Image: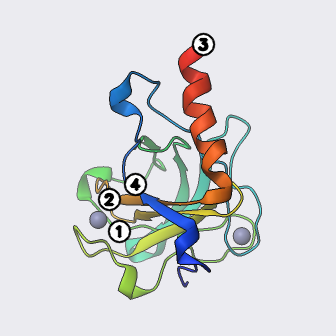
Amino acid sequence: MKLELKNKKEYVSIEHNPYEKKGYSRYAKLNSKCPVCKASVCDKDGKIVLLGKWKDKKHGIFVLSDKFDDFKVEYPEQFNYKEKLIVEFICPYCKSSLVLEEQHNCQKCNAPTIMLKVFTRSVIQFCSRTGCKEHKLFLHKDDMWAFMRQIYTDSML
Ligand SMILES: [Zn+2]
Ligand SMILES: [Zn+2]
């Protein structure tokens, strides 16, 4: 899959929650969709539910946190997360692979990376290797307010 950011100037890339150190609540919720069929991949609690394939054609359902900079994952029962395996994530609706082209491989561990659409026009890219925390949010200017508002509103509760 291609990482398509049509007008690069309209995006800022964010690697960590910019408000973390300012006393605001840590996380912004990513409203995630499949970049191919545009279906929401979130369950009723907002968590990201994806199919995953790993070595020897094993597959199962992975539940990822929808919060930016949070790395909690619920693994399928038969998956050994200690092996630091590479998982090919797949949209549960249209069954498209969410893996990006090789040129976008992880800068830290060289594993393929995964793309999801977030908010309306933004994109998140994250490493497919279990335990690697490399990720990047390409936040579109139209989604800036949605992203910041959540962090700010959370801090008022
Ligand atoms: Zn899809
Ligand atoms: Zn990595």
Kindly identify the residue that appears in the image at 66 percent across and 48 percent down: 31
Kindly identify the residue that appears in the image at 58 percent across and 80 percent down: 4
Q: How many marks?
A: 4
Q: Which of pointers 2 and 3 lies earlier in the amino acid sequence?
A: 2
Question: Is residue 84 shown left or right of residue 152?
Answer: left
Which of the two marks, 2 or 3, is nearer to us in this view? Answer: 3
Q: Which of pointers 3 and 1 lies earlier in the amino acid sequence?
A: 1
* Tag 1 secondary structure: loop
What residue is disc 2 on? 134
Based on the displayed image, in which of its 4 quarters is residue 38 positioned?
bottom right
Q: CA distance from mark 1 to mark 4?
A: 11 Å
Which of the two marks, 1 or 4, is nearer to us in this view? Answer: 1
Tags 3 and 1 in contact by the CB under 8 Å rule? no
Ligand 2 under 8 Å from disc 2 Cβ: yes
93 and 104: which one is in front? 104
* Tag 4 secondary structure: loop
For badge 4, the amino acid type reads: Phe
Question: Is residue 153 shown left or right of residue 134?
Answer: right
What residue is disc 4 on? 79
